[in-house]
Amino acid sequence: MGSYLAEYRAPLTEADCLPLEDMITAEEIQVAIGSLPRGKDSGPDGFLASFYKALAHTLSGPLTAVFKDFFMQGLITDSISESHLMLLATPGNDSSACWAYRPIFLLNTDMTMLTSVLAARIRTFIWNRHTRANIMLVVSLIKCLTWRKPSARYIGRI
């Protein structure tokens, strides 16, 4: 029991929350752009990772402003949360059977960058999860926020 409680971490303190409430910086966006995988299909926006990588320094300023509006005012375009559903055949299975396919969603690249930045921020607070799980959590939170239009303070808490 003592060893279990020794590993238990209490809820986040106010000091823990401060970095989570900071505005997204151009540097964080550049790191997110750098981590975008090459050779992947684009989402509905049509912009490949190579486009953002080639123009990282030029685009980081405008993207910072867009994400700031999202955090401060809850303003976000409907198109940022759009995605394409693709079905990929699983290797070694009969491609004529519908169960032999798995769905993937291709997100817009700006959404991928936003979720990457937010997932990196919360990564230190969520243990035993893969980065993919953190990104999916952030995507779900963003969708929830676009439906409810919460206050900027609430958004910053996430």
Image (cartoon, helix red, strand yellow):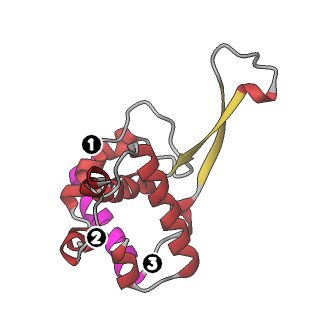
- Going from N to C along the chain, the mark reached first, 1 or 3, is 1
- Residue 124 found in image quarter: bottom left
Mark positioned earlier in the residue sequence (2 or 1): 2
- Indicate yes or no whether the magenta region holds residue 104: no
Q: Where is residue 119 in the image (x, y as percent from the top left)?
A: 35, 55
Provide the major secondary structure of the magenta segment: helix
Residue holding disc 2: 12
Q: Residue at x 49, y 58 (%)?
A: 139
Q: Is residue 2 left or right of residue 96?
A: left
Which amino acid does the dot numbered 3 rest on? Leu
Report how far apart the C-alphas of labels 2 and 3 lie in the structure. 27 Å
* Highlighted magenta segment, given as a residue range: 55-73
| Earlier sequence position, callout 2 versus callout 3 | 2
Q: Judge the density around disc 3: few (<14), some (14-19), many (≥20) Cα neighbours within 10 Å.
A: some
Residue 49 in which image quadrant: top left
Residues at badges 2 and 3 in contact (C-beta under 8 Å)?
no
Say which of 13 and 145 sits in front. 13
